[in-house]
Amino acid sequence: MIVDWTEEFDRWLAHAEEQGGRLLTVAIALLQALTDLPAKPVEESATFKQVRQARRHKLWRVAHPFDPAVAVRIICWFPTDDHAVIALIGFDKKTIGDVFYTSAAARGEALIDAWLRQKGGPDDR
Protein backbone atom coordinates (compact mmCIF):
# COMPACT_ATOMS: atom_id res chain seq x y z
CA MET A 1 0.00 0.00 0.00
CA ILE A 2 1.32 3.42 -0.89
CA VAL A 3 0.60 5.83 1.97
CA ASP A 4 0.16 9.47 1.05
CA TRP A 5 -0.90 12.18 3.50
CA THR A 6 -2.20 15.71 3.87
CA GLU A 7 -0.26 18.74 5.10
CA GLU A 8 -2.30 18.60 8.29
CA PHE A 9 -1.19 15.02 8.91
CA ASP A 10 2.39 15.96 8.05
CA ARG A 11 2.32 18.67 10.74
CA TRP A 12 0.93 16.20 13.28
CA LEU A 13 3.57 13.61 12.38
CA ALA A 14 6.33 16.24 12.70
CA HIS A 15 4.99 17.03 16.18
CA ALA A 16 5.03 13.30 17.03
CA GLU A 17 8.64 13.14 15.83
CA GLU A 18 9.53 16.10 18.09
CA GLN A 19 7.78 14.45 21.05
CA GLY A 20 9.43 11.10 20.37
CA GLY A 21 8.81 8.32 22.85
CA ARG A 22 5.69 6.20 22.85
CA LEU A 23 3.67 8.64 20.70
CA LEU A 24 6.14 8.35 17.83
CA THR A 25 6.56 4.59 18.22
CA VAL A 26 2.81 4.01 18.00
CA ALA A 27 2.36 6.46 15.10
CA ILE A 28 5.05 4.67 13.09
CA ALA A 29 3.49 1.28 13.90
CA LEU A 30 0.10 2.48 12.62
CA LEU A 31 1.66 3.83 9.43
CA GLN A 32 3.36 0.46 9.00
CA ALA A 33 -0.03 -1.28 9.41
CA LEU A 34 -1.34 0.90 6.57
CA THR A 35 1.71 0.18 4.43
CA ASP A 36 1.31 -3.57 5.00
CA LEU A 37 -2.27 -3.65 3.69
CA PRO A 38 -2.56 -5.49 0.35
CA ALA A 39 -5.69 -3.44 -0.53
CA LYS A 40 -8.22 -1.25 1.20
CA PRO A 41 -10.08 -3.02 4.01
CA VAL A 42 -13.38 -4.66 3.15
CA GLU A 43 -14.33 -5.46 6.72
CA GLU A 44 -13.52 -4.04 10.12
CA SER A 45 -10.83 -5.40 12.40
CA ALA A 46 -9.31 -4.35 15.70
CA THR A 47 -6.88 -2.13 13.78
CA PHE A 48 -9.16 -0.81 11.01
CA LYS A 49 -12.69 0.44 11.68
CA GLN A 50 -14.98 2.72 9.74
CA VAL A 51 -15.65 6.15 11.19
CA ARG A 52 -19.42 5.96 11.71
CA GLN A 53 -19.78 9.74 11.94
CA ALA A 54 -18.61 10.16 8.32
CA ARG A 55 -21.51 10.76 5.95
CA ARG A 56 -20.16 11.52 2.48
CA HIS A 57 -17.01 9.41 2.26
CA LYS A 58 -15.90 6.10 3.76
CA LEU A 59 -13.38 7.12 6.38
CA TRP A 60 -11.43 4.58 8.38
CA ARG A 61 -9.63 4.92 11.67
CA VAL A 62 -6.42 3.05 12.32
CA ALA A 63 -5.86 2.19 15.98
CA HIS A 64 -3.61 0.14 18.22
CA PRO A 65 -4.25 -2.10 21.25
CA PHE A 66 -4.84 -0.38 24.59
CA ASP A 67 -1.85 1.53 25.89
CA PRO A 68 -2.22 3.58 29.10
CA ALA A 69 0.29 6.17 27.82
CA VAL A 70 -1.25 7.02 24.42
CA ALA A 71 -4.33 6.40 22.28
CA VAL A 72 -3.15 7.30 18.79
CA ARG A 73 -5.61 7.22 15.91
CA ILE A 74 -5.08 7.94 12.22
CA ILE A 75 -8.09 8.86 10.12
CA CYS A 76 -7.68 7.79 6.50
CA TRP A 77 -9.49 7.34 3.21
CA PHE A 78 -8.85 4.87 0.42
CA PRO A 79 -9.56 6.61 -2.91
CA THR A 80 -9.44 3.38 -4.93
CA ASP A 81 -9.13 -0.35 -4.39
CA ASP A 82 -5.54 -0.35 -5.54
CA HIS A 83 -2.48 0.63 -3.57
CA ALA A 84 -3.19 4.17 -2.38
CA VAL A 85 -4.34 5.69 0.86
CA ILE A 86 -4.61 9.22 2.11
CA ALA A 87 -3.83 9.73 5.80
CA LEU A 88 -5.91 12.75 6.73
CA ILE A 89 -5.64 13.36 10.44
CA GLY A 90 -3.60 11.97 13.31
CA PHE A 91 -4.35 12.51 16.97
CA ASP A 92 -3.90 11.20 20.49
CA LYS A 93 -7.39 10.26 21.64
CA LYS A 94 -6.21 9.79 25.22
CA THR A 95 -6.66 13.49 25.96
CA ILE A 96 -9.93 14.10 24.06
CA GLY A 97 -11.87 10.84 23.86
CA ASP A 98 -14.42 9.68 21.30
CA VAL A 99 -15.94 13.15 20.83
CA PHE A 100 -13.12 13.86 18.39
CA TYR A 101 -14.54 11.49 15.79
CA THR A 102 -17.38 13.89 14.94
CA SER A 103 -15.01 16.74 14.13
CA ALA A 104 -12.50 14.35 12.54
CA ALA A 105 -15.20 13.11 10.16
CA ALA A 106 -16.14 16.65 9.10
CA ARG A 107 -12.49 17.72 8.73
CA GLY A 108 -11.58 14.51 6.91
CA GLU A 109 -14.44 14.82 4.45
CA ALA A 110 -13.50 18.45 3.72
CA LEU A 111 -9.91 17.36 3.05
CA ILE A 112 -11.15 14.63 0.68
CA ASP A 113 -13.35 17.11 -1.18
CA ALA A 114 -10.36 19.44 -1.63
CA TRP A 115 -8.20 16.52 -2.81
CA LEU A 116 -10.86 15.43 -5.31
CA ARG A 117 -11.14 18.97 -6.70
CA GLN A 118 -7.37 19.22 -7.02
CA LYS A 119 -6.73 15.75 -8.47
CA GLY A 120 -10.00 15.10 -10.23
CA GLY A 121 -9.80 11.65 -8.65
CA PRO A 122 -12.47 9.01 -8.02
CA ASP A 123 -15.34 9.64 -5.68
CA ASP A 124 -16.32 6.81 -3.34
CA ARG A 125 -19.84 7.95 -2.51
Image: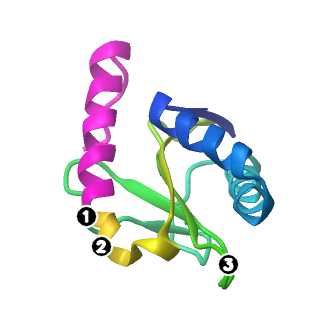
Vertical arrangement, residue 113 with respect to residue 31, above or below: above
Cα gap from disc 2 to disc 1, whole angstroms? 6 Å
Residue 33 is covered by the magenta coloring: no
- In the picture as drawn, the residue positioned furthest to the front comes out as 19
Q: Residue at x 69, y 40 (%)?
A: 1
Could you tell me the amino acid type at mark 1?
Thr
Q: Residue at x 58, y 73 (%)?
A: 71
Cα gap from disc 1 to disc 3, whole angstroms? 23 Å
Residue 118 is covered by the magenta coloring: yes
Q: Nearer the viewer, residue 27 or 105?
A: 27
Could you tell me the amino acid type at mark 3?
Ala
Q: Are marks 1 and 3 in contact (CB under 8 Å)?
A: no
Residue for badge 1:
102
Q: Earlier in the sequence, mark 2 or mark 3?
A: 3
Q: Residue at x 33, y 14 (%)?
A: 118
* Image position, residue 13 (x, y; %): 62, 42
**Residue 38 in view, yes or no:** no
* Image position, residue 88 (x, y; %): 45, 42
- In the rendered picture of this protein, how many numbered marks are placed on residues? 3
Q: Which residues are magenta?
A: 103-125
Vertical arrangement, residue 27 with respect to residue 79, above or below: below
Nearest to viewer (mark 2 / mark 3) = 3
Tell me, for residue 69, which label it has, or none. Answer: 3
Q: Is residue 121 left or right of residue 106?
A: right
Q: Are marks 2 and 1 in contact (CB under 8 Å)?
A: yes
Q: Quadrant of residue 115?
A: top left
Q: Is residue 61 left or right of residue 109?
A: right
